[in-house]
């Protein structure tokens, strides 16, 4: 089955700096890669996603890049703010697998004011 | 749009009792829903895939007789934890799959504490 590795497990940045979280996946058939933000005790919320036919996607301060050949994808947050502090999860899925998501272990991002 | 609710948000029960958790898609129909379990400071662990009108598909190592799943309508899936024990205490989260988007939308979770 699919395996998703996520790094780093913790990331601390100063407000205004950029943050990058990286994930690798094992199954080349995976074709959908969402990123979720989860605040303590709350639900995971989709912040951005990318499909395998696209190399990069951007939404304001958040961007995701995908390298299918290397089987890795990354989340980029620019101009970080304290409210960006949360746990971020990457995931991968593919059609035909009943759309199951395989999650990475998460990255605790702390943005220091 | 794509709102998922979950009820109850928290529940405390005695060991040996059963607890039912409901997951509803409020503004879309979801033929497929998922149930996850999350321990503190850990990732989401998929327990089972719930398909409307058919039996749930359980992940390896998840006891189907202990975690009963029913998906009787296009907007409701339920998870019943039977004969609960303290080790079943956890944060249970459901998600509903929105066809056409490839996206799962999550409920707010249910905190289960078994005494």
Image: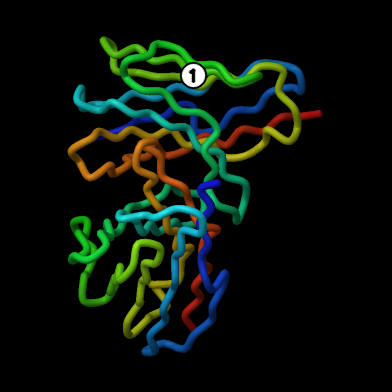
Residue A6 point in image, percent of width and height: 41, 29
- Is residue A25 left or right of B104 when viewed as pictured? left
Relative to A14, say whether B60 is above or below. below
Q: Give me the residue at 81% from left, 28% from top.
A: A113
Q: Give me the residue at 45% from left, 53% from top.
A: B28
At label 1, counting other C-alpha atoms closer than 10 Å, the crowd grade (few under 14, some 14-19, many 20 or more) is many
Q: Quadrant of the N terminus of chain A?
A: top left
Q: Residue furthest right?
A: A113
Q: Give me the residue at 24% from left, 64% from top.
A: B62
Residue A105 point in image, percent of width and height: 42, 39
The quarter of the displayed image where residue B69 is located: bottom left
Relative to A28, say whether B30 is above or below. below
The quarter of the displayed image where residue A54 is located: top left
Residue A23 point in image, percent of width and height: 39, 25
Residue A5 point in image, percent of width and height: 35, 30
- Is residue A107 left or right of A39 when viewed as pictured? left
Relative to B95, say whether B9 is above or below. below
State the residue in front, A101 or A87. Answer: A101
Q: Secondary structure at mark 1?
A: strand
Q: Give me the residue at 48% from left, 51% from top.
A: B106
State the residue in front, A2 or B80. Answer: B80
Residue corresponding to mark 1? A64
Relative to B67, say whether B108 is above or below. above
Instruction: Give the chain letter at badge 1.
Output: A
Type of colouring: rainbow
- Count of numbered circles on the image: 1
């Amino acid at each position: 089955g699919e395996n998703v590795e996520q790094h780093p497990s913790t990331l601390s940045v100063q407000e205004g700096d950029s943050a990058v979280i990286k994930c690798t996946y094992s199954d080349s058939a995976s074709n959908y890669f969402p990123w979720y933000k989860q605040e303590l005790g709350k639900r995971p919320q989709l912040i951005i996603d990318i499909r395998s036919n696209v190399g990069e996607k951007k939404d304001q301060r958040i961007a995701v890049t995908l390298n299918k050949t290397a089987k890795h994808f990354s989340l980029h947050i620019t101009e970080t703010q304290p409210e960006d502090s949360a746990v971020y999860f990457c995931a991968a899925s593919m059609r035909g697998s009943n759309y199951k998501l395989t999650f990475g272990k998460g990255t605790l991002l702390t943005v220091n004011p | 749009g794509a709102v998922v609710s979950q009820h109850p948000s928290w529940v405390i029960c005695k060991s040996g009792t059963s607890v039912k958790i409901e997951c509803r898609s409020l503004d879309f129909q979801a033929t497929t829903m998922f149930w996850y379990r999350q321990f503190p400071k850990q990732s989401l662990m998929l327990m089972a895939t719930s398909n409307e009108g058919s039996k749930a598909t359980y992940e390896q190592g998840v006891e189907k007789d202990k975690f009963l799943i029913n998906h009787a309508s296009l907007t409701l899936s339920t998870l019943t934890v039977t004969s609960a024990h303290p080790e079943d205490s956890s944060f249970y989260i459901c998600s509903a799959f929105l066809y056409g988007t490839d996206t799962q939308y999550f409920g707010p979770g249910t905190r289960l504490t078994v005494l």
